[in-house]
Image: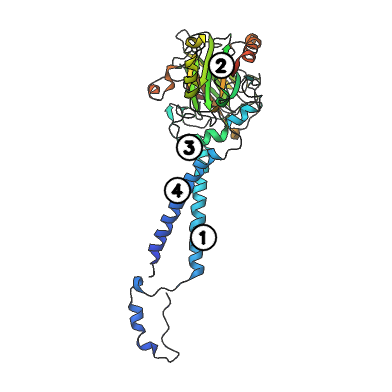
Amino acid sequence: MTVPSPASDGTGYAETDFSVQELPLAIRPHRSRPIRTLLFLTIIVAVGTLLGIGSAYVMIEREQPLNAVSIGAWRAYPKAGTAEADPYSVAIYTRGAVVPLASGEGLALVAREDEAGNLLDPTCVYRISGQTPAARLWTLTATDGDGRLTATLPGRVQVDSQNLLRNPDGSFTISAASKPHSGNWLPVAQGANASDGLRFVLRLYDAPVTTGAALDGISLPVIERVACP
Amino acid sequence: MTLSRRFSTTLGAIAILFLAVVIHILVVFGIPLNVQHSAYDNVATHGPDRQFNLLPDVRPLEEALPDLDPAMKHAACRFQLADGPILFDAGIPTTFWSIGLFNAAGEALYSLNNRTAGADRLSMLVLTPAQLSILRENPPENLEDLIVIETDEISGFALLRAYVPHQSKAESIDRALQAASCGVIS
């Protein structure tokens, strides 16, 4: 607020301008400053729009719907791809044109991290061991960080429950690596960089645990990092 | 009236937050309405409607649809119930198969697998409630053996998944999927 300067123009204004200075801000006469107001509103609109679009982009791009069920390193989205899905998973699934595994078919679980919480890295060797919940069939697939299959040494990108070596107690150990391993070997992308990302997808077919509630307390394989270059 | 500097900063921050929330919601809800290739559109690229089209094997860099299981073979059929009820019929010689019915938005309507189907053969009739009441007046003989699914969704697609236990079975599963029918009942 600029206050009229003490009357140097000789109008006698100086006699009264002490009262102008004392007026509280709220009742002081308003002086419009269109440029400043316009700038203020433009900044509000620009920052608000950027924040809105940016936050939506981040939520959609990380491809993790809200109503996830997490067990260890594994995440499942039983409601995704149904009429009860939250708006984020609707946006993620329709944007990716993904055909979900319906509840009568099976359940897909995705791991993006190992047991220690580190992001999976396709240049490392992982040991996936333990048991799966009851299912008539399950398959374990390695994909890149965007969920796409990648070229591997033998051309195969999955292991399944019907072609698996098991311990006498029914548990199993799978080595996930780009180079061949003895025992159960899940081939991982050949010649990949750490930045390509890695996901393990465990699909349980005809499993009783296709609803979210039934997922509590089930045992899933543990993903441990064995070695990294 | 003149606002104090602190008051107008607070007001500005609230306005930014409010605008950000509104735009966030608009973007998230707007994406499904503005996708260029939905799953329903993608299925059409593999062959004509109202028949099962065998999708190419799921291999790296040539995935027919995103997120399919490489251990399976898939066949997809797009249908429009405006043309009449659709009868799905297939006999697949494998230890596991499943079928999912999806609406045009890609939401699952119904799904079953070879155990829940209760028979080795898939025979499933999908129709609208109006078509079912017409059908009931003059029921076909085998109506009791069919799995009848009523839906209000006019267009959608079905995805049939068949597990390939061993490469030696691949050819017979291919043939069974190609022979699977998804058509208007006569």
Q: Earlier in the sequence, mark 1 or mark 3?
A: 1
Disc 1/disc 3 C-alpha distance (Å): 29 Å
Q: Nearer the viewer, residue A79 or B5?
A: A79
Residue carrying label 3: A88
x and y, in percent, of residue A157 in the image: 61, 21
Whether discs 1 and 4 lie on one chain: the answer is no
Whether discs 3 and 2 lie on one chain: the answer is no
Residue carrying label 1: A42
Residue carrying label 2: B88
Query: Is B179 rendered above or below residue B39?
Result: above
Image quarter of the C terminus of chain B: top right
Query: Is B2 rendered above or below residue A146?
Result: below
Disc 1/disc 2 C-alpha distance (Å): 58 Å
* Residue A66 located left or right of residue A163: left
User: What secondary structure is marked by label 3?
Assistant: helix
Residues packed near mark 2 inside 10 Å, few (<14), some (14 to 19) or many (20 plus): many
User: What secondary structure is marked by label 4?
Assistant: helix
Q: Nearer the viewer, residue B118 or A108?
A: B118
